[in-house]
Amino acid sequence: MKGVFLILNAGSSSLKFAVHEAGSPVTPPLLRGKISGLGTTPVFSAQDNSGADIDPGALAALEPDSNHETLIADLLPWLASRIRGQPLVAVGHRVVHGGQHFDAPVLISPEVLRQLDTFVPLAPLHQPHNLAAIRAVAKWQPAIPQIACFDTSFHRSQNRLAELFALPRDLTNAGVVRYGFHGLSYEYIASILPDHLGERASGRMIVAHLGNGSSICALKDRKSAATSMGFTALDGLMMGCRCGTLDPGVILYLMQAKGMTAPVIEALLYTQSGLLGVSGISNDMHVLQDSDSPHAKEAIDLYCYRAACGLAGLLPSIGGLDGIVFTAGIGENSALVRRLICGHLSWLGISLNDDANDRNATAIGSTQSKVPVLVLPTNEEVIVARACHALLPDGRAQRPQEQYENTAQIDTGQ
Ligand code: AMP
């Protein structure tokens, strides 16, 4: 073995990780796992390549309310002990925002990191955690090359009209456009679609990434034609604690009539809205499904209605529909959510096989459904591992100085 790639995916409520063999076409991970419940009660779990649980050791009892920085600092030595004897070739990161100019994975240099810092206001819930992970690795192993893969990159193929806001042109030219997110998840689903749909995979597909963050992407030729998230990851569908699409007049009202400041409104829209805000109970779909509260039911109903509206709203970008895929935590696991969303879409000729849907089967469309409906688990870490392999194909790390020379040529356009 030529060593391993470590993949880190530092999200808003979870920290996912995977270890992949370097220097060969990407095979299943040697191990993968996650710390979920960040900000509340962190829970660690990891599996080896046979799917067997790995002993968490010291990570069995994580401090409540631990932040990303402390968790990463705890996780790195644990990972190092698991990959003992296999040189660490590079660390790949999911980074939410790459702006307009990072349209492909890059080796991270101090200059690249500085550019990525400038996108923090565009993704305040995610970008700081992604960058904290990069800095933690740099502190831990300064000589290890690090690679950033961007959630925005996959959407650079969006239709021009799908990218534009109806704002004055100088704002568009200054980069106030719809970037779109969850690109690594969509890229993974696009890569496996032919395994499930054959030639139909290149048709007009809708992929619904429904997790704590939720969005929808319309694919044609397995490329992004349009997506529901916009300038920030706040737009589009209702989410765990984000509001999704909102009349901008509401924000003006909150500022002018209610005297709310920008930081207060930011916290409201990013952390107190969505399922949490409407239910008043939780941002967690599983918890809401188990609740008897009418507010929990209304939150789920609104989530599904808005998701169906978002899905239907993307159809003009691809001119029709050849299939639907549900993915991510809610999309992969909630039969109720899939049933409610597809119920709103029955006029499109979509119907589910209830038994298959209840089992979270891969193909859940009924025999009468006009298009196939699939449930496909996403795997953003595999896309990052593939990027590590593409940038370091012989599995050997470049010296950091060479790495910095390469990336210094990137025109970030800032
Ligand atoms: P993600 O952000 O992709 O990790 O997804 C997290 C969301 O998936 C949370 O709202 C969870 O409650 C939800 N989820 C996970 N498993 C289930 C399940 N079995 N039923 C309903 N929701 C679930």
Image (cartoon, grey):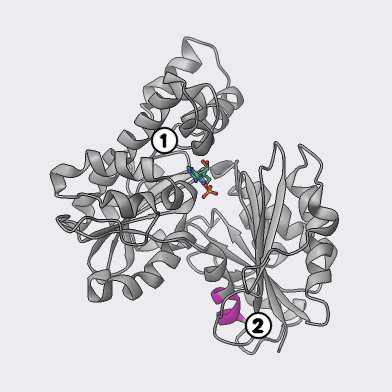
Q: Which residues lie in the magenta part?
A: 386-391
Query: In the image, 112: left or right of 154?
Result: right
Which is the main secondary structure of the residues drawn in magenta?
helix
Nearest the viewer among 130 and 116 is 130
Few, some or many residues within 10 Å of mark 1 (<14, 14–19, 20+): many
Amino acid type assigned to the residue bearing label 2 in the image = Ala
Nearest the viewer among 116 and 34 is 34
- The CB of the residue at mark 2 lies under 8 Å from ligand 1: no
Residue 308: x %, y % from top left: 28, 41
For marks 1 and 2, give the CA distance.
38 Å
Amino acid type assigned to the residue bearing label 1 in the image = Met
- The CB of the residue at mark 1 lies under 8 Å from ligand 1: no
Identify the image quadrant of the N terminus. Answer: bottom right
Residue 71: x %, y % from top left: 77, 50
Asked which secondary structure carries label 2, the reply is loop
Residue receiving disc 1: 238
Nearest to N terminus: mark 1 or mark 2: 2
Identify the residue at the far front of this view. 355
Residue 334: x %, y % from top left: 42, 45
Residue 227: x %, y % from top left: 35, 51
